[in-house]
Image (spheres, helix red, strand yellow):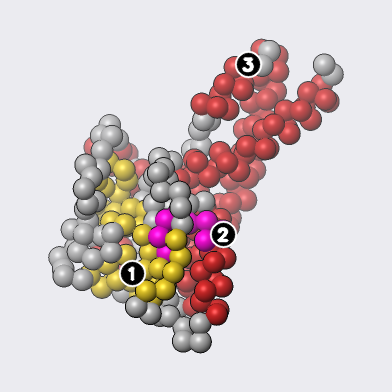
């Protein structure tokens, strides 16, 4: 096969799955069983339960717009979702000045972009605001499915395919990193909040423990990074997953 058709074929197959790869890489193992998103009003509060998606966002934006009396609180329970959907929801929360309330957990893109965006936050005494990385983490691996595609290619094509893949991922990540930086500048939060737990002093201590899903912060730790005005119901705040052996480590 000539070089140009090979390149076109490889690009078509690589780009088809590139956005999926970025989604999985930036949200890792957090988004699993929770596939259904529910959006509703309860006791005058907006509720967002499940994965953060563009469809869920559209639904909650429409619900908010249709109400004569606008809710002041967004109660959320989410393991995360795509970066784009998380930033879109967080930007909207910031624009509307909504209070974000977390009674159970807000993980991954929920913590990265929704919790950080709210001017005021309410958490229960056990609520988990969990982080495990962001677009500035600087490492995006190849999943097993893509690796299998590479392995099935003739050796001469593998090198071309891997380079195309790496270049495409790098360009896409650079674009998304700029979008993330713009978001954190808007909400006036230190972007390192999404990556600080990946520093060697933490990975050396917690990296081998499969029960550790990521990290969170003390109230002071959040405030140091620009996330202020957190009210704890029934303090003290001791983050803990209910009915689960998983946990997060806490950074001050």
Residue in view at x 26 percent, y 38 percent: 211
* The C terminus: image quadrant: bottom left
> Within 10 Å of the Cα at label 2, are there few (<14), some (14-19), or many (20+) other Cα atoms?
few
Name the spot of residue 5 as percent of width and height, x first.
83, 25
Disc 1: which residue: 101
Q: Is residue 241 above or below residue 220?
A: above
Residue in view at x 82 percent, y 16 percent: 1
Asked if the stretch drawn in magenta spans residue 14, the answer is no
Query: Which residues are drawn in magenta?
Result: 48-56
Name the spot of residue 168 as percent of width and height, x first.
66, 38
Verify CB contact (< 8 Å) between mark 3 and mark 1: no
Name the spot of residue 154 as percent of width and height, x first.
68, 13
> Within 10 Å of the Cα at label 3, are there few (<14), some (14-19), or many (20+) other Cα atoms?
few
Q: Is residue 63 above or below residue 198?
A: below
The numbered dot on residue 152 is 3
Find numbered disc 1 in the image and state the secondary structure of the residue it sits on: strand
Whichever of labels 3 and 2 marks the residue nearer the N terminus, that label is: 2
Q: Is residue 210 above or below residue 231?
A: above
Q: Give the Cα distance between marks 3 and 1.
A: 48 Å
Disc 2: which residue: 55
């Amino acid at each position: 096969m000539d070089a140009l058709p090979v390149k076109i074929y490889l690009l078509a197959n690589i780009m088809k799955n590139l956005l999926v790869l970025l989604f999985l890489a930036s949200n890792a193992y957090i988004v699993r069983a929770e596939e259904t998103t529910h959006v509703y009003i309860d006791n005058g509060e907006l509720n967002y339960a499940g994965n953060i998606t563009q469809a869920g966002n559209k639904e909650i934006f429409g619900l908010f717009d249709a109400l004569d009396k606008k809710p002041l609180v967004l109660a959320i329970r989410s393991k995360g979702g795509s970066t784009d959907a998380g930033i879109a929801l967080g930007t909207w929360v910031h624009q509307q000045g909504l209070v974000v309330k977390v009674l159970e957990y807000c993980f991954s893109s929920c913590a990265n972009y929704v919790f950080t965006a709210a001017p005021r936050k309410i958490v229960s005494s056990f609520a988990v605001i969990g982080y495990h990385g962001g677009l500035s983490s600087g490492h995006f691996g190849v999943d097993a499915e893509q690796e299998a595609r590479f392995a099935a290619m003739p050796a001469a094509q593998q090198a071309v395919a891997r380079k195309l893949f790496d270049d495409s991922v790098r360009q896409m990540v650079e674009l998304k990193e700029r979008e993330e930086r713009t978001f954190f500048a808007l909400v006036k939060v230190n972007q390192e909040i999404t990556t600080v737990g990946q520093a060697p002093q933490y990975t050396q201590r917690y990296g081998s423990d499969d029960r550790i899903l990521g990290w969170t912060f003390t109230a002071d730790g959040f405030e140091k990074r620009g996330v202020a005005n957190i009210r704890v119901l029934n303090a003290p705040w001791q983050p803990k997953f209910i009915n689960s052996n998983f946990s997060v480590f806490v950074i001050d």
